Image: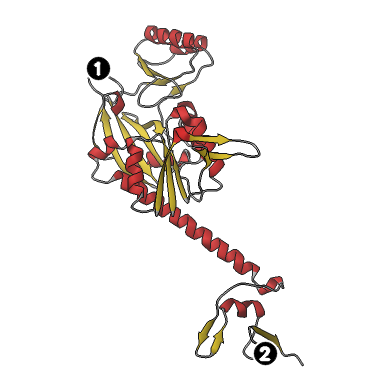
Amino acid sequence: MKAALISLGSQSSIMTAEAMKKYFDRVDMIQLKNVEVTLGKEGGVFYQGKPLENYDCLYVKGSFRYANLLRSIASMLENKTPYMPIPANSFSTVHNKLLTHLVLQQHNIPMPKTYISPNTEEAKELLKRVNYPIVMKFPEGTQGKGVMFADSISSASSLLDALGALNQPFIIQEYIDTGGTDIRALVVGEKVVAAYQRRAKTEEKRANIHAGGSGEPVQLSRETINIALDTAKALQTDICGVDILEGHLGPLVIEANLSPGLQGISKVSTLDIPNEIAKFLFQKTEKILSASKKIATTEVMKELSPENGNSHEVITDLKLRGERILLPHWVTKITGFDDRKDYIVRAKKGRLEVEEFKI
């Protein structure tokens, strides 16, 4: 089986591609920045100017900045590729926090109270009704970037004025006090294969590792595990990181990540995380290919069925037992030959005809 990983070439992607080589016959690592998509009559996905090869498994991942390209690649290839762990629509949904929260809302997945306003004027009216502190976020962004905190209506109003001047969309969310911690759960298939608690550094509210936070082992409750699995299922992705706050209201999902870093979680996990991902990709691909072969075989046998009344020509080998010819079992099924009837056999060099004898 052939597999490829399309990414920006992060260390996490390199770790995963190397692990995949233990399972797949061939694994190609493809740089996302060298991939282009052409639409129209001559449309297709091209890598370094040449049509991208066909693969049995294609794992596409990358930053939110490339969400449109990632979705385009997946859209063009998902009907040609037996298995892709992340479908096209997930790139648009998960790379946008607002769309993510809308999906969570539709699937009754718990999350912090979130507000959306059409403009800064309406947002300022909203600020008079919320409890402080609050969180203000850009819909797009990772690693804690684009996340701001306001502990009063005056500081929130100042942030709104700045956002208005920048003409930036934003969402407002209630602040959940967890002592500067959050949880990253890594979902692979139908399992949370690993999780760790991230703790913000002093005077920092963001617990992201890229924002200076530290990671430590954590034992998840069954409720938190189920919420992580439900989130991945709602977002229609087989592999993702789910960020969760565990406050006094219970576990609340704050966002998901389609390209989760593996270095931090690998340091606190006893499992070989890249290997878990690679093994899952292989097993899932193998299962899909096996099912496809069964379907194809069923269709062939249906076509060869005597019920359709057609004659058939199939290239096959013949089994000999001593000096006797053994015909394939499907010949009996097609012809309906019965050992209680008599038959006329015509044979000459290189040719054999068998016909039912009728009086």
Q: Quadrant of the C terminus?
A: bottom right
Residue 230 is left or right of residue 319, and the answer is: left
> Compared to 18, does 199 lie above or below?
above
Choose between 262 and 196: the one closer to the eye.
262
Residue 232 % position (x, y): 43, 40
Disc number at residue 203?
Answer: 1
Q: Quadrant of residue 240?
A: top left
Number of residues whose C-alpha sits closer than 10 Å to that of mark 2, classed few (under 14), some (14–19) or many (20 or more): few
> Compared to 43, does 339 lie above or below?
below
Q: Which is in the foreground here, disc 2 or disc 1?
A: 2
Report which residue position mark 2 lands on. Answer: 345
Residue 193 % position (x, y): 32, 45
Residue 288 is left or right of residue 142, and the answer is: right
Q: Quadrant of residue 314?
A: bottom right
Name the residue at 56% across, 41% down: 76
CA separation in Å, label 2 and label 1 = 93 Å
Residue 206 % position (x, y): 31, 23
Circle 1: residue type: Glu
Dot 2 falls on a residue whose secondary structure is strand
Name the residue at 39% across, 9% down: 153
Name the residue at 50% across, 51% down: 82
Q: Earlier in the sequence, mark 2 or mark 1?
A: 1
Circle 2: residue type: Val
Dot 1 falls on a residue whose secondary structure is loop
Q: Quadrant of the N terminus?
A: bottom left
Q: Quadrant of residue 352?
A: bottom right
Choose between 248 and 175: the one closer to the eye.
175
Residue 34 % position (x, y): 47, 34
> Compared to 142, does 133 lie above or below?
above
